[in-house]
Structure formats: C-alpha cells, structure tokens
Image (tube, grey):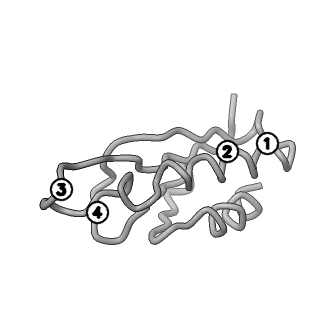
Amino acid sequence: MPRVHVFVCDNHRPEGGRPACGDRGGRAVAQALTEAVLARGAGGRIAITRCQCLGLCFDGPTAVEYPAGRWWTALTPALAVELAAALD
C-alpha cells in the first residue's frame, strides 16, 4: 500500500467559464509526476491519481498530497519533477 497519495486535478470546463486545471496542463503535470515517481523507484510507495476539481481553479494546475495535506498550485511538468523528489 502506498504511504503517499497525490491527487492532481485534470478537470475540464467549457470555454468562457472558470479556468480549469485540465485546460492549463493538468494532464501533463500528472504524467510528468507519474514518470518522475517511477524513475525514482518510488512507484510502490507513492500513488498518483488524476482527479476532478480540487477547488483552486484560478491557481491551477493543482495537486494535494495525503496524508500530509500539502497543496501545490501553478504546477508545470518541470515543477512536478521537483515535487516527486520532495515526496520521497
């Protein structure tokens, strides 16, 4: 069982509404984070899950780590690689 679980918002909304993490690169962030975790050999200890809205739409892409309860906003794929190192 993983000891850390990170949820990365990949929500999409129709054009003209509130911003959405998926439209700002949420999927690329989740992919980069997953690849970085696997490259570190931490795949069994850290789980990455794409999810819908985490509520910080104007600050996204957003992720939250459990059980620590740490939040990250304005993520990019490059920052996701740094995040992977901080998780392990």
Category of crowding for the residue at label 4, using alpha-carbon neighbours closer than 10 angstroms: few (below 14), some (14–19), many (at least 20): some
Q: Earlier in the sequence, mark 4 or mark 2?
A: 2
Secondary structure state at the residue bearing disc 2: helix
Secondary structure found at label 4: helix
Residue 51, relative to residue 23: is it above or below? above
Instruction: Please give the name of the residue rendered at 48% of the width and 64% of the height, measured from the top-left corner.
Output: 71
Q: Disc 1 designates what residue?
A: 38
The residue positioned 64% from the left and 45% from the top of the image is 4
Foreground pick, 4 / 24: 24
Marks 1 and 4, how far apart at CA: 28 Å
> Mark number for residue 10?
none
- Please tell me whether mark 3 sits on a helix, a strand or a loop: loop
Q: Residue at x 40, y 62 (%)?
A: 24
Q: Amino acid at mark 2?
A: Thr
> Residue 15, which numbered label?
3
Q: Which residue occupies 68% across, 35% down?
A: 2
Using a 10 Å C-alpha cutoff, classify the residue at mark 2 as few (fewer than 14 neighbours), some (14 to 19) or many (20 or more): many
Look at mark 4 in the image and give the residue it sits on: 57
Vertically, is 31 above or below 73? above
The answer to which of marks 3 and 4 sits earlier in the sequence is 3
Q: Residue furthest top?
A: 1
Of callouts 1 and 4, the N-terminal one: 1
Closest to the camera, between mark 3 and mark 2, is: 3
**Numbered mark located on residue 34 in the image:** 2
Between the residue at mark 3 and the residue at mark 2, the CA separation in whole angstroms equals: 28 Å
Q: Position of residue 62 (x, y in %)?
A: 43, 60
Q: Residues within 10 Å of mark 3 (few under 14, many from 20)?
A: few
Q: Amino acid at mark 3?
A: Glu
Q: Residue furthest front?
A: 15
